[in-house]
Amino acid sequence: MKKHSLMMSLVALAISASPAWAKLSPEEAARLGNDLTPLGAERAGSADGSIPAWDGGILKAPAGYKPGDHHPDPFSDDPVLYTITKANLAQYKDLLSPGQVAMFDTYPDTFQMKVYPTRRSASFPQAVYDATKQYATSAELVEGGNGIKGVAMGIPFPEPKNGLEAIWNHILRYRGKGATRNGGQAAPTASGDYTLIKFDEQIMFKYSEPGVTPAALEESNILFKFKQRVTEPARLAGTALLVHETMDQVKTPRQAWTYNTGQRRVRRAPNVAYDAPGTASDGLRTTDDFDMFNGSPNRYDWTLKGKRELLIPYNSYKLHSDKVSYEQILKPGHINPELVRYEKHRVWVVEANLKPGLRHIYKKRVFFIDEDSWQIAIADIYDNRDQLYRVAMAHALNYYEVPTLWSTLETYYDLQSRRYLAIGLDNQEAMYDFAADLNDNDFTATALRREGLR
């Protein structure tokens, strides 16, 4: 506990001593690919060896894999190092977030964490590494931190100096140039009953298109385009959503449209933001919970608290397997702990506190961001009474065909209602298609109406 507190204090002191809005110097940028990984993580392992050095991550797919397959587990022979239960929780509290500890308090008889050897499997295309270094000295936040400029494709702030820079790294982490995906979500009741909601989704990352430049992004002011259609159950089928996410959200806020099957028309949807309830989520997540955090950060004050070691979901191939059914995953209270792999990784800690005079059902959010990928792994969420309200977890793995580290399943646990939402259930669906031929015509209001009518 003392070791982690000291590490947090030292890193926080270093951050507070840095200019809050300064660009990286050439000397700082030169560390990328040297003592730091190309995306800004510490290349070296931990002092005790429990976190190994980063050696490039997964550089090739396991033998026999081909795009379109569910991704086989390259670490299937790894042993469980130890299992944390309510009975031995005190021994491991310094490696857990407050929200994770609360899960043991809420479900003392069933929640557990199986901890495996740490595998720093995150890897990305060389073009992402090159762009990160190329723009490291030019990337900057726009006024108020509600957008970025001077960067494309890469991680904009590989050596973050404040919380806003770190959260933008998560928002803009590389996930390919686009993808189509089929999947579902479920919100089990306390007894474990659930209705599976299925979606077809398409996403095009304008920020990550090959050859994209900062000037082109600033002219279009679009980071990505996202389209979603509900396919099951029948009572919701055809409901559709379209989002254009902007680069400078001061210049142009997020643009969104919905298609309602009852009205059979497309409508502008300015309320698809902040704490509006997520699609068919039973009120168990907000719109800006999706992808662990998305959208404008302007309702919060963001603080970079430092870096620490934490047990987080990682290399979640067992949970992703097409040999596993949804019934095996979805259990009362929480997903099946036998399928969840935790590893010790270094994470950036970012705290978001609601600004005075602004509203959101979350007063405070604490994000724990994987240093190797900038994927938010854990989010502890507090209500307006300063009580822990929800805990979100992203179960990530390396998608070999890109490559990228991205979540296969996100779980949002409501500690007060003792229910949860699982998003991204794809075990029994076709795998993501990262080679899909998408273009801007697929992301118009007309295209949205066609999706709803299908």
Image (cartoon, helix red, strand yellow):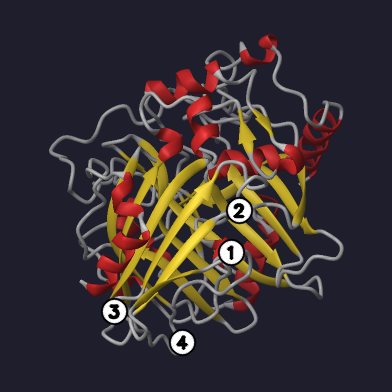
Marking on residue 273: 1
Tell me whether circle 3 and circle 2 mark residues in contact (CB < 8 Å).
Answer: no
Nearer the viewer's eye, disc 2 or disc 1? 2
* Distance Cα–Cα, label 4 vs label 3: 22 Å
The residue pinned by badge 4 equals 189
Mark 4 / mark 1, whichever is N-terminal:
4
Q: What's the amino acid at mark 1?
A: Ala
The count of marks equals 4
Q: Could you say where residue 247 lies in the image, as x and y percent from the top left? A: 57, 41
Q: Secondary structure at mark 2?
A: loop
Structural distance between the alpha carbons of marks 1 and 3: 22 Å
Tell me the residue that label 2 is attached to.
253
* Sequence-first tag of 2 and 4: 4
For residue 30, say whether it is visible: yes
Marks 3 and 2 sit apart, C-alpha to C-alpha, by: 28 Å
Please state which of residues 384 and 60 is positioned toward the viewer in this rendering.
Answer: 384
Q: Marks 4 and 3: which is nearer the front?
A: 3
Q: Check disc 3 and report the residue beneath it.
A: 237
Q: Identify the residue at horizontal 66%, vertical 61% (top origin).
A: 380
Q: Amino acid at mark 4?
A: Thr
Q: Residues within 10 Å of mark 1 (few under 14, many from 20)?
A: many
Going from the N terminus, do you reach mark 3 or mark 2 first? Answer: 3
Q: Does 356 appear above or below 19?
A: below
Q: Nearer the viewer, residue 359 or 413?
A: 359
